[in-house]
Image (cartoon, grey):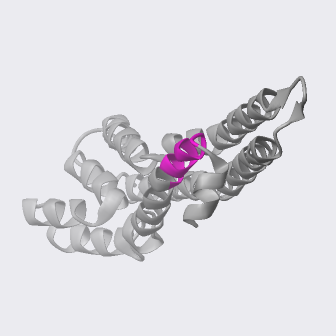
Amino acid sequence: MLEIVQAAGWPIWFLILASVVAIPIIVERFWALRRSVIIPKGLVDEVLHEFKQRGINTALLARTAQRGPLGQIIAAGLANAQAPRVVMKEAIEEVGRVVTHRLDRFLTTLGTIAAMAPLLGLFGTVIGMIEIFGSTTDVGANPVALAHGISVALYNTAFGLMIAIPCMIFYRHFRALVESYIVEMEREAIRLVDAVHK
């Protein structure tokens, strides 16, 4: 591996840095965007059952808010259950914006790496081409310098694509996942509002 890095030249270090940043983001987003964490199964039904049995109390609000992003949205709605329907919906929407922002965390960075990696590979290719042309003299080309320039050009292009393709796949996957969660949380929040304000 060290031989490949040496053959790829100094431009490869930018790509290595990009991959070092991307891998933890992908692992963290896989862990943070689990369905059981974002939208616990049966949460709204449990909360509505307790709400009908005992009404609103601070223990219910605190417990609900600790049940992930959907729990925070539901708790904001319950805290305003005595208010008019419009006020309750506004409170839910306000917390929903904060939750959406948290779900999108690091996705911009991952998307930037996916877009930037091919450009960094192209940069390495240009550096390799400069080395190739620099190896040419009046008496001919230096074969060692020529080979090094070609390896710099090709390795950087390959590494750039190797980083960009998985990053783009994961970025698109996480974006779609977040959007589906947002739609589902909106549906659950509307169900809560409808149940409270029959």
Q: Is residue 94 left or right of residue 191?
A: left
Q: Residue furthest left?
A: 58
Residue found at x 42% / y 54%: 189
What predominant SS class does the magenta segment belong to?
helix
| Residue found 51% across the figure and 40% down from its top | 108
Q: In the image, is residue 138 above or below residue 60?
A: above
The residue that appears at 37% across and 59% down in the rendered structure is 70
Span shown in magenta? 10-19
**Quadrant location of the C terminus?**
bottom left
Task: Name the side, left or right, on which 3 lies relative to 155.
Answer: left
Seen from the viewer's position, the closer of residues 198 and 171 is 171
Q: Residue furthest top?
A: 138
Closest to the observer, 181 or 50: 181
From the viewer's perspective, is residue 86 above or below residue 66?
A: above
Write down the quadrant of residue 176 in the picture. Answer: bottom right
Residue 191 inside the magenta-drawn segment: no
Q: Choose between 171 and 140: the one closer to the eye.
A: 140
Q: Is residue 171 above or below residue 26?
A: above
Q: Quadrant of residue 40?
A: bottom left
Q: Dividing the image into 4 quarters, which one contains the N terminus? A: bottom right
Who's the residue at 63% across and 37% down the image? Answer: 116
Q: Percent from the top left, x then y, of residue 62?
A: 14, 61
Residue 176 in view? no
Q: Is residue 103 visible?
A: yes
Q: Position of residue 33 (x, y in %)?
A: 45, 63
Whole-percent x, y for residue 51 in the image? 23, 67
